[in-house]
């Protein structure tokens, strides 16, 4: 695909990337090949002048929900903190992979651990973006019982992103689960009001409402598709865009 076809539509982007994007299929861990594949796209996007912040999940390493069954020896809040630490591990892997490609990055964590990551400070993150560094945001919001979707909506709003890219394994928003209903209808474009009226699950309700109030557009797309992140940032017709 010619580079001219991938000229950025957006100047500043918040990419919400699940931990599964860096993992293996069906088993825990960090898949270096998948991490490189993601990093290569992010590097090309940064080289085109896009200011890129990435909120990373930790589901490939640990999910708090896995402790909810049976006797709860580990409390839900503790399990969530463990999940936050998993996002830092993914952030370190993505950071080193990008820097091996010559891309300058900064890893910031909402859970303070200065020996491996900067604390998240909005003004500092903005300065890094303005200098062309990819900012990797780990540790969620630093609070238990808050989803990575909400962390992405919060950081996207704070950093005044032009769009929130939600990278998933589904190629957009449907009126039913496409894995269970072969007649499920995919939407190319929706408004925030339509999502509410149709009761569509774009992201959790708290995150969605935050984006709606901030008028922060949400693009839901399948990161597994060829050059999906680059095409999304270039404004190609990909996934489902939700706007005001």
Image: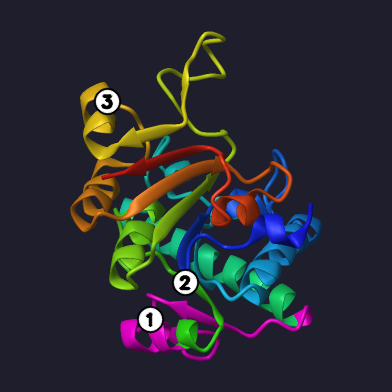
Q: Is residue 233 among the parts visible in the rendering? A: yes
Q: Are marks 1 and 3 in contact (CB under 8 Å)?
A: no
Segment tinted magenta in the rendering: 100-127
Alpha-carbon span between mark 1 and mark 3: 33 Å
Q: Which residue is mark 2?
A: 137
Q: Is residue 244 left or right of residue 11?
A: left
Alpha-carbon span between mark 2 and mark 1: 8 Å
Q: Which residue is mark 1?
A: 120
Q: Which residue is mark 3?
A: 199
Sequence order check: which comes first, mark 2 or mark 3? Answer: 2
> Which secondary structure, mark 1?
loop
Between 20 and 181, the one lying in front of the other is 181
Residue most toward the left? 213
Q: Is residue 205 left or right of residue 175?
A: left
Sequence order check: which comes first, mark 1 or mark 3? Answer: 1
Judge the density around disc 2: few (<14), some (14-19), many (≥20) Cα neighbours within 10 Å.
Answer: many
Q: Is residue 222 left or right of residue 156?
A: right
């Amino acid at each position: 695909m010619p580079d001219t076809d991938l000229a950025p539509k957006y100047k500043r982007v918040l990419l919400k990337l699940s931990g599964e994007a860096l993992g293996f299929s069906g088993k825990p861990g960090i898949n270096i090949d998948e991490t490189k594949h993601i990093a290569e796209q992010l590097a090309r996007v940064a080289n085109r002048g896009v200011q890129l912040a990435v909120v990373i999940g930790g589901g490939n390493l640990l999910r708090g929900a896995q402790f909810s069954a049976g006797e709860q020896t580990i409390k839900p809040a503790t399990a969530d903190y463990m999940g936050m630490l998993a996002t830092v591990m993914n952030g370190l892997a993505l950071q080193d992979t990008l820097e091996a490609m010559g891309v300058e990055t900064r890893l910031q964590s909402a859970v303070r651990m200065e020996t491996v990551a900067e604390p998240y400070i909005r003004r500092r993150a903005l300065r890094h973006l303005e200098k062309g560094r990819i900012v990797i945001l780990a540790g969620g919001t630093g609070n238990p019982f808050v989803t990575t979707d909400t962390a992405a909506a919060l950081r996207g709003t704070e950093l005044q992103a032009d769009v929130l890219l939600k990278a998933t394994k589904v190629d957009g928003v449907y009126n039913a689960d496409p894995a269970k209903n072969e007649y499920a209808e995919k939407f190319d474009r929706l408004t925030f009001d339509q999502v509410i009226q149709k009761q569509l699950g774009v992201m959790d309700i708290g995150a969605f409402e935050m984006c709606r109030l901030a008028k922060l557009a949400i693009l839901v797309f399948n990161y597994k598709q060829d050059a999906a992140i680059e095409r999304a940032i270039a404004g190609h017709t990909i996934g489902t865009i939700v706007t005001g």
